[in-house]
Image (cartoon, rainbow, N blue to C red):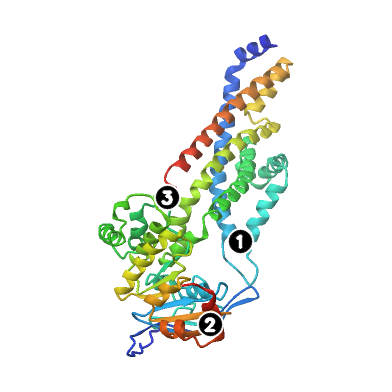
Amino acid sequence: MEIKTNKKTEAGEELIRVEGLEKKFGSLQVLKGIDQVIRKGEVVSVIGPSGGGKSTFLRCLNLLEVPDGGSIFFEGVDITRKDVDINLHRQKMGMVFQHFNVFPNMTVGENVTMAPVLLGKKTKEEAREMAKELLNRVGLLDKIDAYPQKLSGGQKQRLAIVRALAMEPDVMLFDEPTSALDPEMVGEVLNVIKELVKTGMTTVIVTHEMGFAKEVSDRVLFMDGGVIAEEGTPEELFEHPKSERTKEFLGKVLY
Amino acid sequence: MIENLIRVWDKYWILFLQGLGITLLLSLITVVAGCILGFLLSLLRMSKLRIFHFRPLNTIAGIYVEVIRGTPILLQLYFFYFMLPEMIPFLNPSKLVCCTFALCLNSAAYVSEVIRAGIQAVDKGQTEAARSLGLNQKQTMMHVVLPQAVKNILPALCNEFVTMIKETSLASTFFVGELMTVYRTISGALFLTIEPLIIVGIIYFIVTFTLSKGVLYMEKRMAASAA
Protein backbone atom coordinates (compact mmCIF):
# COMPACT_ATOMS: atom_id res chain seq x y z
CA MET A 1 0.00 0.00 0.00
CA GLU A 2 1.26 3.40 -0.96
CA ILE A 3 1.44 5.93 1.85
CA LYS A 4 1.51 9.55 0.83
CA THR A 5 3.33 12.05 2.97
CA ASN A 6 0.87 13.92 5.11
CA LYS A 7 0.59 17.61 4.41
CA LYS A 8 0.58 19.64 7.59
CA THR A 9 -1.18 22.94 7.90
CA GLU A 10 -2.20 25.11 10.83
CA ALA A 11 -5.67 23.62 10.80
CA GLY A 12 -4.35 20.13 11.49
CA GLU A 13 -3.26 17.15 9.47
CA GLU A 14 -5.23 16.13 6.45
CA LEU A 15 -7.35 13.08 7.35
CA ILE A 16 -9.69 12.63 4.40
CA ARG A 17 -9.15 14.06 0.94
CA VAL A 18 -11.91 13.67 -1.65
CA GLU A 19 -11.09 14.38 -5.27
CA GLY A 20 -13.66 14.58 -8.08
CA LEU A 21 -16.05 12.17 -6.36
CA GLU A 22 -18.88 10.99 -8.60
CA LYS A 23 -21.72 8.57 -7.94
CA LYS A 24 -24.56 7.41 -10.14
CA PHE A 25 -27.60 5.37 -9.27
CA GLY A 26 -28.67 4.01 -12.63
CA SER A 27 -28.96 7.03 -14.86
CA LEU A 28 -29.32 9.45 -11.95
CA GLN A 29 -26.09 11.26 -11.13
CA VAL A 30 -26.20 11.84 -7.38
CA LEU A 31 -22.71 13.23 -6.89
CA LYS A 32 -21.25 15.40 -9.62
CA GLY A 33 -17.63 15.82 -8.71
CA ILE A 34 -16.98 16.64 -5.06
CA ASP A 35 -13.63 17.96 -3.84
CA GLN A 36 -13.16 18.23 -0.14
CA VAL A 37 -10.49 17.99 2.54
CA ILE A 38 -11.31 17.05 6.12
CA ARG A 39 -8.60 17.68 8.66
CA LYS A 40 -7.85 15.97 11.96
CA GLY A 41 -10.00 17.28 14.78
CA GLU A 42 -12.35 19.09 12.47
CA VAL A 43 -16.12 18.96 12.91
CA VAL A 44 -17.88 19.23 9.56
CA SER A 45 -21.65 19.38 9.15
CA VAL A 46 -23.31 18.60 5.85
CA ILE A 47 -26.69 20.22 5.33
CA GLY A 48 -29.01 20.65 2.39
CA PRO A 49 -32.30 19.50 0.89
CA SER A 50 -33.25 15.83 0.57
CA GLY A 51 -31.90 14.22 -2.58
CA GLY A 52 -29.00 16.65 -2.66
CA GLY A 53 -26.45 13.88 -2.18
CA LYS A 54 -25.54 14.46 1.49
CA SER A 55 -25.96 10.89 2.67
CA THR A 56 -24.44 9.45 -0.49
CA PHE A 57 -21.40 11.65 0.01
CA LEU A 58 -21.01 10.43 3.59
CA ARG A 59 -21.55 6.78 2.63
CA CYS A 60 -18.90 7.09 -0.06
CA LEU A 61 -16.33 8.12 2.54
CA ASN A 62 -16.17 4.58 3.94
CA LEU A 63 -17.16 2.99 0.65
CA LEU A 64 -20.56 1.75 1.72
CA GLU A 65 -21.39 3.26 -1.64
CA VAL A 66 -18.77 2.54 -4.26
CA PRO A 67 -17.95 5.73 -6.18
CA ASP A 68 -18.18 5.76 -9.96
CA GLY A 69 -15.42 8.32 -10.29
CA GLY A 70 -12.81 10.21 -8.33
CA SER A 71 -10.62 9.25 -5.39
CA ILE A 72 -10.89 9.21 -1.63
CA PHE A 73 -7.68 9.40 0.38
CA PHE A 74 -7.96 8.32 4.00
CA GLU A 75 -4.82 8.86 6.07
CA GLY A 76 -2.90 9.20 2.84
CA VAL A 77 -4.15 6.02 1.17
CA ASP A 78 -6.44 6.02 -1.85
CA ILE A 79 -9.11 3.66 -0.53
CA THR A 80 -10.96 3.54 -3.85
CA ARG A 81 -8.12 1.50 -5.33
CA LYS A 82 -9.01 -2.14 -5.93
CA ASP A 83 -5.88 -3.48 -4.19
CA VAL A 84 -6.70 -1.73 -0.90
CA ASP A 85 -8.29 -3.82 1.86
CA ILE A 86 -11.17 -1.52 2.71
CA ASN A 87 -12.03 -3.54 5.83
CA LEU A 88 -8.82 -2.41 7.52
CA HIS A 89 -9.60 1.24 6.82
CA ARG A 90 -13.22 0.94 7.87
CA GLN A 91 -12.02 -0.10 11.32
CA LYS A 92 -10.73 3.45 11.65
CA MET A 93 -13.95 5.08 10.44
CA GLY A 94 -16.89 4.82 12.79
CA MET A 95 -20.33 5.20 11.33
CA VAL A 96 -23.69 5.94 12.91
CA PHE A 97 -26.86 5.40 10.90
CA GLN A 98 -30.25 7.04 10.80
CA HIS A 99 -31.97 3.79 11.75
CA PHE A 100 -29.43 2.80 14.45
CA ASN A 101 -28.88 -0.68 13.00
CA VAL A 102 -27.96 -2.13 16.38
CA PHE A 103 -27.66 -5.92 16.33
CA PRO A 104 -30.88 -7.34 17.83
CA ASN A 105 -29.41 -10.81 18.34
CA MET A 106 -26.75 -9.53 20.73
CA THR A 107 -26.94 -7.90 24.14
CA VAL A 108 -25.98 -4.26 24.52
CA GLY A 109 -22.55 -5.31 25.76
CA GLU A 110 -22.04 -7.77 22.91
CA ASN A 111 -23.02 -5.10 20.40
CA VAL A 112 -20.07 -3.08 21.66
CA THR A 113 -17.49 -5.84 22.10
CA MET A 114 -18.22 -7.99 19.05
CA ALA A 115 -16.16 -6.11 16.47
CA PRO A 116 -13.08 -5.29 18.60
CA VAL A 117 -12.86 -8.92 19.77
CA LEU A 118 -13.60 -10.49 16.39
CA LEU A 119 -11.09 -8.28 14.62
CA GLY A 120 -8.41 -8.98 17.21
CA LYS A 121 -8.13 -5.46 18.60
CA LYS A 122 -8.98 -6.46 22.15
CA THR A 123 -9.34 -9.54 24.31
CA LYS A 124 -12.80 -10.33 25.61
CA GLU A 125 -11.98 -8.95 29.06
CA GLU A 126 -10.42 -5.76 27.74
CA ALA A 127 -13.36 -5.20 25.42
CA ARG A 128 -15.84 -5.77 28.23
CA GLU A 129 -14.03 -3.24 30.43
CA MET A 130 -14.00 -0.70 27.62
CA ALA A 131 -17.68 -1.37 26.89
CA LYS A 132 -18.51 -0.66 30.54
CA GLU A 133 -16.62 2.60 30.47
CA LEU A 134 -18.12 3.76 27.16
CA LEU A 135 -21.64 2.72 28.12
CA ASN A 136 -21.25 4.53 31.40
CA ARG A 137 -20.33 7.69 29.52
CA VAL A 138 -23.63 7.60 27.59
CA GLY A 139 -25.70 6.47 30.58
CA LEU A 140 -26.35 2.92 29.41
CA LEU A 141 -24.20 0.95 31.83
CA ASP A 142 -27.21 -0.55 33.58
CA LYS A 143 -28.42 -1.94 30.23
CA ILE A 144 -25.21 -3.82 29.42
CA ASP A 145 -26.83 -7.25 29.60
CA ALA A 146 -30.20 -6.25 28.14
CA TYR A 147 -31.20 -6.85 24.55
CA PRO A 148 -31.68 -3.81 22.27
CA GLN A 149 -35.36 -4.70 21.93
CA LYS A 150 -35.81 -3.23 25.41
CA LEU A 151 -34.20 0.11 24.50
CA SER A 152 -35.84 3.32 23.34
CA GLY A 153 -34.81 4.90 20.04
CA GLY A 154 -32.53 7.38 21.78
CA GLN A 155 -30.88 4.62 23.78
CA LYS A 156 -30.39 2.53 20.65
CA GLN A 157 -28.69 5.42 18.92
CA ARG A 158 -26.43 6.05 21.91
CA LEU A 159 -25.56 2.36 21.82
CA ALA A 160 -24.79 2.64 18.10
CA ILE A 161 -22.42 5.52 18.82
CA VAL A 162 -20.66 3.53 21.54
CA ARG A 163 -20.42 0.51 19.23
CA ALA A 164 -18.62 2.65 16.66
CA LEU A 165 -16.35 4.23 19.28
CA ALA A 166 -15.30 0.82 20.57
CA MET A 167 -13.20 0.39 17.44
CA GLU A 168 -11.29 3.54 18.46
CA PRO A 169 -11.83 5.21 15.11
CA ASP A 170 -9.96 8.23 13.77
CA VAL A 171 -13.14 9.76 12.37
CA MET A 172 -16.83 9.44 13.13
CA LEU A 173 -19.40 9.64 10.35
CA PHE A 174 -22.97 10.43 11.36
CA ASP A 175 -25.72 9.88 8.82
CA GLU A 176 -28.76 11.86 10.05
CA PRO A 177 -28.39 10.40 13.56
CA THR A 178 -31.53 12.04 14.94
CA SER A 179 -33.91 11.89 11.97
CA ALA A 180 -35.61 8.66 13.05
CA LEU A 181 -36.00 9.68 16.69
CA ASP A 182 -39.03 10.90 18.60
CA PRO A 183 -38.57 14.61 19.27
CA GLU A 184 -38.03 14.14 22.99
CA MET A 185 -35.06 11.85 22.35
CA VAL A 186 -33.19 14.08 19.93
CA GLY A 187 -31.56 16.04 22.75
CA GLU A 188 -29.97 13.08 24.52
CA VAL A 189 -28.33 11.88 21.30
CA LEU A 190 -27.12 15.33 20.32
CA ASN A 191 -25.61 15.73 23.79
CA VAL A 192 -23.61 12.54 23.36
CA ILE A 193 -22.33 13.79 20.01
CA LYS A 194 -21.45 17.16 21.57
CA GLU A 195 -19.46 15.44 24.31
CA LEU A 196 -17.68 13.40 21.67
CA VAL A 197 -16.80 16.47 19.64
CA LYS A 198 -15.29 18.06 22.76
CA THR A 199 -12.79 15.20 23.00
CA GLY A 200 -11.35 16.31 19.66
CA MET A 201 -12.82 13.51 17.56
CA THR A 202 -12.85 14.29 13.85
CA THR A 203 -16.53 14.26 12.91
CA VAL A 204 -18.56 14.48 9.74
CA ILE A 205 -22.27 14.76 10.36
CA VAL A 206 -25.13 14.87 7.92
CA THR A 207 -27.98 16.55 9.72
CA HIS A 208 -31.21 18.46 9.51
CA GLU A 209 -30.63 19.95 12.97
CA MET A 210 -29.51 23.41 11.91
CA GLY A 211 -29.12 24.75 15.42
CA PHE A 212 -26.88 21.85 16.28
CA ALA A 213 -24.83 22.20 13.11
CA LYS A 214 -24.34 25.87 13.87
CA GLU A 215 -23.28 25.19 17.42
CA VAL A 216 -20.78 22.35 17.05
CA SER A 217 -19.32 22.69 13.57
CA ASP A 218 -16.02 24.16 12.52
CA ARG A 219 -17.22 24.10 8.97
CA VAL A 220 -20.58 23.61 7.25
CA LEU A 221 -21.09 22.23 3.76
CA PHE A 222 -24.30 23.02 1.94
CA MET A 223 -25.00 20.32 -0.64
CA ASP A 224 -27.55 20.61 -3.40
CA GLY A 225 -27.92 18.91 -6.76
CA GLY A 226 -24.92 16.65 -6.23
CA VAL A 227 -22.39 19.40 -5.58
CA ILE A 228 -21.19 21.38 -2.59
CA ALA A 229 -23.03 24.59 -3.41
CA GLU A 230 -21.46 26.55 -0.58
CA GLU A 231 -19.16 25.99 2.38
CA GLY A 232 -17.85 28.05 5.22
CA THR A 233 -17.81 28.55 8.96
CA PRO A 234 -21.22 28.27 10.61
CA GLU A 235 -21.27 32.04 10.92
CA GLU A 236 -20.48 32.63 7.26
CA LEU A 237 -22.97 30.10 6.04
CA PHE A 238 -25.87 30.69 8.38
CA GLU A 239 -25.56 34.48 8.87
CA HIS A 240 -24.16 35.56 5.52
CA PRO A 241 -24.94 32.94 2.91
CA LYS A 242 -23.64 33.93 -0.49
CA SER A 243 -25.43 31.57 -2.88
CA GLU A 244 -29.08 32.16 -3.70
CA ARG A 245 -29.77 28.46 -3.25
CA THR A 246 -28.39 28.49 0.29
CA LYS A 247 -30.44 31.56 1.18
CA GLU A 248 -33.56 29.94 -0.18
CA PHE A 249 -32.92 26.71 1.73
CA LEU A 250 -32.13 28.41 5.02
CA GLY A 251 -35.19 30.63 4.59
CA LYS A 252 -37.38 27.54 4.45
CA VAL A 253 -36.01 25.64 7.45
CA LEU A 254 -36.60 26.65 10.99
CA TYR A 255 -33.82 26.52 13.51
CA MET B 1 -67.08 -50.59 8.65
CA ILE B 2 -65.85 -49.76 12.15
CA GLU B 3 -65.45 -53.47 12.74
CA ASN B 4 -63.35 -53.75 9.62
CA LEU B 5 -61.18 -50.82 10.69
CA ILE B 6 -60.43 -52.46 14.01
CA ARG B 7 -59.84 -55.80 12.38
CA VAL B 8 -57.37 -54.37 9.86
CA TRP B 9 -55.52 -52.39 12.53
CA ASP B 10 -55.35 -55.38 14.88
CA LYS B 11 -53.94 -57.59 12.22
CA TYR B 12 -51.53 -55.24 10.50
CA TRP B 13 -50.56 -52.53 13.00
CA ILE B 14 -46.95 -53.61 12.88
CA LEU B 15 -46.90 -53.10 9.12
CA PHE B 16 -48.48 -49.67 9.46
CA LEU B 17 -45.93 -48.59 12.04
CA GLN B 18 -43.09 -49.96 9.95
CA GLY B 19 -44.41 -47.99 7.01
CA LEU B 20 -44.59 -44.89 9.17
CA GLY B 21 -41.01 -45.51 10.27
CA ILE B 22 -39.81 -45.63 6.69
CA THR B 23 -41.88 -42.55 5.82
CA LEU B 24 -40.34 -40.60 8.69
CA LEU B 25 -36.84 -41.82 7.92
CA LEU B 26 -37.22 -41.01 4.25
CA SER B 27 -38.54 -37.52 5.03
CA LEU B 28 -35.80 -36.87 7.58
CA ILE B 29 -32.99 -37.94 5.26
CA THR B 30 -34.56 -35.92 2.49
CA VAL B 31 -34.87 -32.76 4.52
CA VAL B 32 -31.42 -33.01 6.12
CA ALA B 33 -29.73 -33.65 2.79
CA GLY B 34 -32.03 -31.07 1.23
CA CYS B 35 -30.89 -28.54 3.83
CA ILE B 36 -27.21 -29.12 3.12
CA LEU B 37 -27.67 -29.03 -0.65
CA GLY B 38 -30.14 -26.19 -0.34
CA PHE B 39 -27.72 -24.12 1.70
CA LEU B 40 -25.00 -24.58 -0.92
CA LEU B 41 -27.51 -23.78 -3.62
CA SER B 42 -28.61 -20.60 -1.87
CA LEU B 43 -24.95 -19.54 -1.61
CA LEU B 44 -24.63 -20.04 -5.35
CA ARG B 45 -27.78 -18.03 -5.94
CA MET B 46 -26.45 -15.15 -3.86
CA SER B 47 -22.89 -15.29 -5.18
CA LYS B 48 -21.51 -12.11 -6.62
CA LEU B 49 -19.15 -13.82 -9.07
CA ARG B 50 -19.54 -11.95 -12.32
CA ILE B 51 -18.04 -12.50 -15.74
CA PHE B 52 -18.86 -9.32 -17.64
CA HIS B 53 -22.62 -9.04 -17.21
CA PHE B 54 -23.10 -12.77 -16.82
CA ARG B 55 -23.35 -14.32 -13.37
CA PRO B 56 -22.75 -18.01 -14.08
CA LEU B 57 -23.29 -19.44 -10.58
CA ASN B 58 -26.52 -17.51 -10.04
CA THR B 59 -27.82 -18.56 -13.42
CA ILE B 60 -27.05 -22.26 -12.97
CA ALA B 61 -28.62 -22.34 -9.51
CA GLY B 62 -31.58 -20.31 -10.74
CA ILE B 63 -32.25 -22.66 -13.63
CA TYR B 64 -32.00 -25.65 -11.30
CA VAL B 65 -34.54 -24.20 -8.88
CA GLU B 66 -36.93 -23.21 -11.63
CA VAL B 67 -36.77 -26.62 -13.33
CA ILE B 68 -37.44 -28.43 -10.05
CA ARG B 69 -40.28 -26.12 -9.14
CA GLY B 70 -41.70 -26.20 -12.63
CA THR B 71 -41.99 -29.98 -13.01
CA PRO B 72 -44.13 -32.44 -11.02
CA ILE B 73 -42.40 -34.25 -8.20
CA LEU B 74 -43.78 -37.53 -9.56
CA LEU B 75 -42.00 -36.88 -12.84
CA GLN B 76 -38.76 -36.27 -10.94
CA LEU B 77 -39.23 -39.57 -9.11
CA TYR B 78 -39.74 -41.42 -12.39
CA PHE B 79 -36.74 -39.67 -13.89
CA PHE B 80 -34.29 -40.69 -11.18
CA TYR B 81 -35.88 -44.11 -10.78
CA PHE B 82 -34.82 -44.83 -14.35
CA MET B 83 -31.79 -42.56 -14.66
CA LEU B 84 -29.84 -43.27 -11.48
CA PRO B 85 -29.19 -46.96 -12.21
CA GLU B 86 -28.00 -45.88 -15.67
CA MET B 87 -25.74 -43.17 -14.27
CA ILE B 88 -24.12 -45.24 -11.52
CA PRO B 89 -24.63 -48.89 -12.57
CA PHE B 90 -21.65 -50.05 -10.50
CA LEU B 91 -23.39 -48.97 -7.27
CA ASN B 92 -26.57 -50.75 -8.25
CA PRO B 93 -28.83 -48.30 -6.41
CA SER B 94 -31.98 -49.73 -4.89
CA LYS B 95 -35.46 -48.34 -5.59
CA LEU B 96 -35.42 -46.63 -2.20
CA VAL B 97 -32.08 -44.95 -2.94
CA CYS B 98 -33.37 -43.67 -6.28
CA CYS B 99 -36.49 -42.23 -4.67
CA THR B 100 -34.54 -40.68 -1.80
CA PHE B 101 -32.17 -39.14 -4.30
CA ALA B 102 -35.01 -37.59 -6.28
CA LEU B 103 -36.74 -36.28 -3.16
CA CYS B 104 -33.46 -34.78 -1.86
CA LEU B 105 -32.84 -32.90 -5.08
CA ASN B 106 -36.44 -31.70 -5.02
CA SER B 107 -36.22 -30.59 -1.41
CA ALA B 108 -32.92 -28.79 -2.00
CA ALA B 109 -34.57 -26.46 -4.49
CA TYR B 110 -37.32 -25.48 -2.07
CA VAL B 111 -34.98 -25.23 0.91
CA SER B 112 -32.61 -22.98 -1.02
CA GLU B 113 -35.49 -20.59 -1.65
CA VAL B 114 -36.42 -20.67 2.05
CA ILE B 115 -32.82 -19.90 3.06
CA ARG B 116 -32.43 -17.19 0.46
CA ALA B 117 -35.65 -15.50 1.54
CA GLY B 118 -34.65 -15.82 5.20
CA ILE B 119 -31.27 -14.20 4.61
CA GLN B 120 -32.66 -11.47 2.42
CA ALA B 121 -35.32 -10.67 5.01
CA VAL B 122 -32.58 -9.50 7.40
CA ASP B 123 -32.48 -5.70 7.21
CA LYS B 124 -29.78 -4.37 4.90
CA GLY B 125 -28.81 -1.90 7.63
CA GLN B 126 -27.48 -4.81 9.67
CA THR B 127 -24.99 -5.68 6.96
CA GLU B 128 -24.03 -2.04 6.53
CA ALA B 129 -23.45 -1.60 10.25
CA ALA B 130 -21.27 -4.70 10.40
CA ARG B 131 -19.28 -3.73 7.33
CA SER B 132 -18.82 -0.19 8.65
CA LEU B 133 -17.14 -1.66 11.73
CA GLY B 134 -14.61 -3.36 9.48
CA LEU B 135 -16.03 -6.89 9.39
CA ASN B 136 -15.50 -8.60 6.04
CA GLN B 137 -18.31 -10.20 4.09
CA LYS B 138 -17.86 -13.63 5.63
CA GLN B 139 -17.66 -12.34 9.21
CA THR B 140 -20.76 -10.24 8.60
CA MET B 141 -22.59 -13.31 7.32
CA MET B 142 -21.50 -15.59 10.18
CA HIS B 143 -21.87 -13.22 13.12
CA VAL B 144 -24.63 -10.82 12.14
CA VAL B 145 -26.81 -11.97 9.25
CA LEU B 146 -27.06 -15.76 9.69
CA PRO B 147 -27.92 -15.72 13.42
CA GLN B 148 -30.84 -13.44 12.58
CA ALA B 149 -31.78 -15.32 9.42
CA VAL B 150 -32.01 -18.62 11.33
CA LYS B 151 -35.07 -17.27 13.13
CA ASN B 152 -36.78 -16.74 9.79
CA ILE B 153 -35.55 -19.99 8.32
CA LEU B 154 -36.02 -22.58 11.06
CA PRO B 155 -39.84 -22.62 11.20
CA ALA B 156 -40.01 -22.72 7.40
CA LEU B 157 -37.61 -25.68 7.35
CA CYS B 158 -39.77 -27.56 9.83
CA ASN B 159 -42.75 -26.91 7.59
CA GLU B 160 -40.71 -28.31 4.71
CA PHE B 161 -40.29 -31.48 6.77
CA VAL B 162 -44.05 -31.68 7.30
CA THR B 163 -44.62 -31.21 3.57
CA MET B 164 -42.03 -33.86 2.78
CA ILE B 165 -43.79 -36.41 5.00
CA LYS B 166 -46.78 -36.06 2.70
CA GLU B 167 -44.72 -35.90 -0.50
CA THR B 168 -42.97 -39.20 0.25
CA SER B 169 -46.30 -40.92 -0.35
CA LEU B 170 -45.60 -40.44 -4.06
CA ALA B 171 -42.67 -42.82 -3.71
CA SER B 172 -45.23 -45.59 -3.17
CA THR B 173 -45.51 -45.60 -6.97
CA PHE B 174 -42.32 -47.65 -6.81
CA PHE B 175 -43.28 -49.74 -3.76
CA VAL B 176 -40.45 -48.52 -1.55
CA GLY B 177 -42.12 -49.63 1.68
CA GLU B 178 -43.29 -46.34 3.19
CA LEU B 179 -46.75 -45.82 4.63
CA MET B 180 -48.61 -45.51 1.33
CA THR B 181 -46.91 -48.66 0.05
CA VAL B 182 -48.20 -50.44 3.14
CA TYR B 183 -51.69 -49.29 2.21
CA ARG B 184 -51.34 -50.70 -1.29
CA THR B 185 -50.02 -54.00 0.05
CA ILE B 186 -52.77 -54.44 2.60
CA SER B 187 -55.62 -53.30 0.39
CA GLY B 188 -54.36 -55.71 -2.27
CA ALA B 189 -54.21 -58.60 0.20
CA LEU B 190 -57.62 -57.97 1.78
CA PHE B 191 -59.49 -56.58 -1.22
CA LEU B 192 -60.45 -53.67 1.06
CA THR B 193 -59.86 -50.19 -0.30
CA ILE B 194 -61.42 -47.76 2.17
CA GLU B 195 -60.59 -49.07 5.63
CA PRO B 196 -56.78 -49.25 5.34
CA LEU B 197 -56.89 -45.89 3.57
CA ILE B 198 -58.65 -44.33 6.56
CA ILE B 199 -56.11 -45.81 8.94
CA VAL B 200 -53.20 -44.53 6.85
CA GLY B 201 -54.89 -41.13 6.59
CA ILE B 202 -55.29 -40.92 10.36
CA ILE B 203 -51.61 -41.80 10.86
CA TYR B 204 -50.48 -39.15 8.37
CA PHE B 205 -52.76 -36.60 9.97
CA ILE B 206 -51.68 -37.26 13.55
CA VAL B 207 -48.01 -36.95 12.61
CA THR B 208 -48.26 -33.82 10.46
CA PHE B 209 -50.76 -32.08 12.75
CA THR B 210 -48.60 -32.65 15.81
CA LEU B 211 -45.50 -31.43 14.01
CA SER B 212 -47.26 -28.34 12.65
CA LYS B 213 -48.48 -27.41 16.11
CA GLY B 214 -44.95 -27.95 17.41
CA VAL B 215 -43.60 -25.58 14.77
CA LEU B 216 -46.19 -22.95 15.70
CA TYR B 217 -45.18 -23.25 19.33
CA MET B 218 -41.52 -22.92 18.42
CA GLU B 219 -42.25 -19.81 16.33
CA LYS B 220 -44.05 -18.20 19.23
CA ARG B 221 -41.23 -19.04 21.60
CA MET B 222 -38.66 -17.54 19.23
CA ALA B 223 -40.72 -14.40 18.70
CA ALA B 224 -40.98 -14.00 22.46
CA SER B 225 -37.28 -14.52 23.12
CA ALA B 226 -35.09 -11.45 22.77
CA ALA B 227 -35.74 -10.26 19.22
Marked residue chain, label 1: B
Marked residue chain, label 3: A
Residue B34, percent across and down? 57, 45
Q: Of the two numbered discs 3 and 2 on the same chain, state the one appearing first in sequence.
A: 3
Q: Residue at x 64, y 33 (%)?
A: B166
Q: CA distance from mark 3 to mark 2?
A: 42 Å
Graded by Cα atoms within 10 Å as few (under 14), some (14 to 19) or many (20 or more), the crowding at tag 3 reads some
Graded by Cα atoms within 10 Å as few (under 14), some (14 to 19) or many (20 or more), the crowding at tag 2 reads some
Q: CA distance from mark 1 to mark 2?
A: 53 Å
Label ID, residue A247: 2
Is residue A16 toward the left or the right of residue A51 in the image?
left
Q: Quadrant of residue B135?
A: bottom left
Rendered-image quadrant of the N terminus of chain A:
bottom left
* Amino acid marked by disc 2: Lys
Q: Quadrant of residue B142?
A: bottom left
- Mark whose residue sits in front, 1 or 2: 2
* Amino acid marked by disc 1: Leu
Q: Residue at x 25, y 57 (%)?
A: A125
Q: Which residue is mark 1?
A: B57
Q: Nearer the viewer, residue A19 or B159?
A: A19
Label ID, residue A149: 3
Q: CA distance from mark 1 to mark 3?
A: 38 Å
SS at circle 3: helix
